[in-house]
């Protein structure tokens, strides 16, 4: 018996549908460094993982608090630097 698995890699179009966000906005977030782990396939297409989907939820939450994209970028950068940035 086969079980259905949730995909772990998504195209920009799939993410746009899943998160009801435009592909333009996704590209902008990536270009601004808000999604630093998005990688590209051999053709240069963005490939998103479940981690990026979770980050998109976090970005939406932070934006809803009124946080600017610049501050969100700082938050993302600090997060990936680990515990040495906890005080910030």
Image: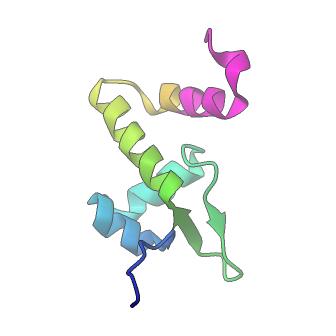
Within the image, what quadrant is residue 24 found in? bottom left
The question of residue 84 being in magenta is answered with yes
Asked whether 71 falls inside the magenta stretch, the response is no
Q: Which residue is drawn at 41% across and 71% down?
A: 6
Quarter of the image for the N terminus: give it.
Answer: bottom left
9 or 62, nearer to the observer: 9
Locate the C terminus by quadrant.
top right
Residue 9 percent location from the top left of the image:
52, 71
Q: Is the magenta stretch mostly helix, strand or loop?
A: helix
Residue 20 position within the rendered picture, expressed as x and y whole percent measured from the top left: 26, 60
Q: Residue furthest bottom?
A: 1
78 vs 1, nearest the viewer = 1
**Farthest residue, direction front:** 1
Residue for point 58% across, 52% down = 31
Q: Is residue 42 left or right of residue 79?
A: right
Seen at 57% across and 69% down, the residue is 46
| Residue 44 as seen in the image, left or right of residue 12 | right
Residue 70, image x, y percentages: 51, 29
Does residue 19 appear to the left or right of 15 in the view shown?
A: left
The range drawn in magenta is 73-88
């Amino acid at each position: 018996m086969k079980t259905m698995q949730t995909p772990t890699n998504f195209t920009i179009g799939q993410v746009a549908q899943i998160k009801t966000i435009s592909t333009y906005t996704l590209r902008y977030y990536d270009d601004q460094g808000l999604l630093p782990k998005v990688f590209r396939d051999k053709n240069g297409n963005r490939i998103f993982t479940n981690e990026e989907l979770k980050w998109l939820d976090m970005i939406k939450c932070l934006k809803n608090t009124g946080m600017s994209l610049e501050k969100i970028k700082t938050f993302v950068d600090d997060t990936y630097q680990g515990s040495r940035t906890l005080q910030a």
